[in-house]
Amino acid sequence: MNTVKMNLELRQDHSGVNMSYNFIDNYIGVDFERLLSSWEETHTSISLESFIKVLTIHELGHAADRLALLESLERTIEIFQTKKRYILSEIYNDRSLLAMLIEEHEMNITFEQTAWVNAEQVNQKYNLVHQSTFRLVKKLSLESYQKLYLEDLKLYENQLENLNEKTA
């Protein structure tokens, strides 16, 4: 962070998320236990240092997009509060609630992609990690978001298909 002159506070947390940018309070949270597990799960030859560097500049990429994140806050809170009112099975069995979940996934993926674009620019400017290492960590990270999104999207599409069959 010193190299790129973006010094955000780092706070240790136990959230189960390796690193996350808190755009409301403008800090990076780190769950060191999860970070180590996440690195081990990559099953690659990427060093822990490089892995941490890539994730850190990715979180700085979110910080560069802070205004857009803040603009999404109202909708994010609405979704969060709605999700708290229902158990998971209710969300997955209600087409409108599942549509809301899809919307949340799409918002998250957009923010993730933007953060990766920003991080890539930082990495190219400062040459912090080898480009192939950067691309691999990026791919693994985005795949985790895409996987959950595609699973929920398939359920949503199945619900729509079932509805169309009933009304036909």
Image: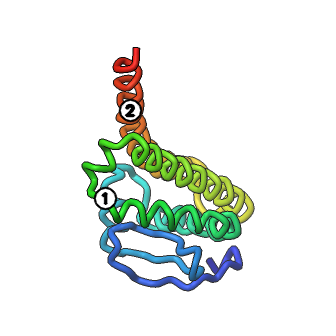
- Quarter of the image for residue 2 reads bottom right
The reply, left or right, for residue 105 in relation to residue 44 is: right
Residue 27: x and y in percent read 55, 80
Residue at 42% x, 66% y is: 81
From the viewer's perspective, is the residue at label 2 or at label 1 nearer?
1
Colour approach in the figure:
rainbow
Q: Position of residue 69 (x, y in %)?
A: 63, 65
Judge the density around disc 2: few (<14), some (14-19), many (≥20) Cα neighbours within 10 Å: few
* Image position of 143 with respect to 117: above or below: above
Q: Amino acid at mark 2?
A: Lys
- Which residue corresponds to mark 1? 86
Residue 56 in picture, x, y percent from top left: 54, 69
Give the image location of residue 42, x and y in percent. Answer: 36, 52
Q: Earlier in the sequence, mark 2 or mark 1?
A: 1
Q: Quadrant of the C terminus?
A: top left
Q: Residue at x 51, y 67 (%)?
A: 77
Q: Which mark is drawn over residue 62?
A: none
Residue 154: which numbered mark, if any? Answer: 2
Looking at the rendered structure, the kind of residue marked 1 is Tyr
In terms of secondary structure, where does tag 2 sit?
A: helix
Left or right of 35, for residue 118: right
Q: Nearer the viewer, residue 54 or 21?
A: 21
